[in-house]
Image (tube, rainbow, N blue to C red):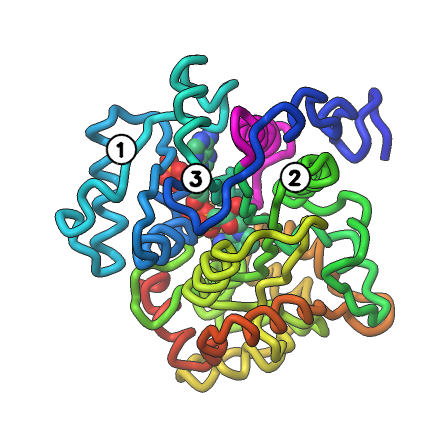
Amino acid sequence: MEVGGAVNGIPPGDLVLDARIGPAGARPCGPGPPRQVLLTGATGFLGGYLLARLLATAGTTVHCLVRGRTPERAAEALDGRLRAHGIDPAAVRGRVVAVSGTLSKPLLGWSADAFAAAAERIDTVYHCAASVNLLASYEQLRTATVLGTAEVLRFAATHRVKPVHYISTLGVLAHALAAGGGRRLAEDDPLPPPAGPGYCRAKWVAELLVRTAAARGLPVRIHRPGAILGDDSGAAVATTDWLMRLTAASVRVGAVPRHEAVLPLATAGHIADAVVALSLQAPPADGPVYHTVQPQHLSFADYFALVRTLGHELAEEPYDVWLDRLAAAESDSDTGEVRLAQAVEQCFPARQHGAAARIGSDAFQREVGRLGLPPAPAIDAELIRGQLDRLLR
Ligand SMILES: NC(=O)c1ccc[n+]([C@@H]2O[C@H](COP(=O)([O-])OP(=O)(O)OC[C@H]3O[C@@H](n4cnc5c(N)ncnc54)[C@H](OP(=O)(O)O)[C@@H]3O)[C@@H](O)[C@H]2O)c1
């Protein structure tokens, strides 16, 4: 829908990457594995796993962009993340560098000199940070997620070319997912039009900018997780994860939605293992996309059958009845689960046209096999129990 020049709420200017951002004029990236890397989002859920995996790679120093804090507070926040992953901060002192900054300001909130110096020092970028909020509008999310990604790309193309490992989301496929029709959505399909909640559209625009930079010659890899579960280590639970929040809300009301869709899932540890292992290989020139999901997909029904084996009594209800029950439970404490469910319904409509769309992940599974990574941990009842218990507490 076009309103005031904006397509689906997206101002046309947002779709254009600053013409000055590109590798022309920068030194080509050097050979060899990443040594001095910039990680965004290290204080978050998936970013914490990436930080832990990067530190397991010998010889890597991880510079973490941490927002809105003094250097001391930024370092404390990272220490907390390290401890959650069983890493003693003292044991990695000097290999984790907290850098105050923000995605929400030009040059990542740094002075021109600091930006230039960091752009010389850093050889690889892992861009995981974003405003992760399915309830917020595009307008609320665009500064950090869209403009911030453009600044990360500017950084990657300044002075020396730095490969960018970008964390996108399967939410960029909201349009194709909602269309259903039994289609298989492959990694190398063109991006469908932007659709869904503001979060999906902001991530869609950010991915478009990354793809534009790739077309200009910046080496990039794009990773699209679906729903992310914490793993057995118990390091963290994704409070940002829509599926787990809706599972907890469903357990509270004793009802689950009847739905045909297939759930794309993976554990954070598996995703981080793959992102880091792939980053040790030079990115191919075509900016490949990976659907970082399990090879076996669960239907909604299979998933909630697993939840039932944990002893929760869950009646299967039509989508609108389930929503009414969530709303009744939520009336005196607005936890946002109803709005969250409505946002999710924009990607997985209650009544699909024909069979649900399926997520293809051939390239991702091929790379996991080729790199000899451990197989994806099974999504079983015990894994779900660990996440759910912490959310229900
Ligand atoms: N969780 C999922 O199920 C899921 C699924 C698919 C894709 N993803 C993608 O995975 C990535 C990580 O998600 P997550 O679940 O780990 O989210 P999260 O826990 O909310 O972490 C988000 C991270 O981004 C940082 N951040 C947000 N705004 C920033 C800004 N303006 N400047 C600098 N840093 C900023 C946060 O910093 P603070 O600590 O200061 O808030 C935090 O470190 C995102 O790109 C998301 O789109 C997530």
**Which badge, 3 or 1, is on the more N-terminal residue?**
3
Residue sitting at x 61%, y 76%:
295
Q: CA distance from mark 2 to mark 3?
A: 15 Å
Res 141 seen here: no
Magenta segment, which residues?
134-161
Q: Which residue is mark 1?
A: 74
Residue 154: image quadrant is top right
> Mark 2 sits on what residue?
210
Asked if the beta carbon under badge 1 is closer than 8 A to the nearest atom of ligand 1, the reply is: no
Residue 181, can we see it?
yes
Residue 28 among those drawn in magenta:
no
Give the x, y percent position of residue 18: 69, 22
Does the beta carbon of the residue at mark 3 sit less than 8 Å from ligand 1? Answer: yes
SS of the residue under disc 2:
helix
Q: CB under 8 Å between callouts 3 and 1?
A: no
SS at badge 1? helix
Find out whether the residues at labels 2 and 1 contact each other: C-beta distance under 8 Å: no
Which amino acid type is marked by label 3? Thr
Residue type at mark 2 is Val
Residue 121 occupies quadrant? top left
Please tell me which of labels 2 and 3 falls first in the chain. Answer: 3
On the image, the x and y values in percent for residue 29 come to 54, 39
In x, y percent, where is residue 178?
78, 58
Left or right of residue 330: residue 357: right
Residue nearer the viewer, 13 or 288: 288
The residue identified by callout 3 is 40
Specify the amino acid type for callout 1: Ala
Q: Nearer the viewer, residue 97 or 325?
A: 97
Q: Is residue 90 above or below residue 300?
A: above
Rendering coords of residue 74 (x, y %): 27, 33
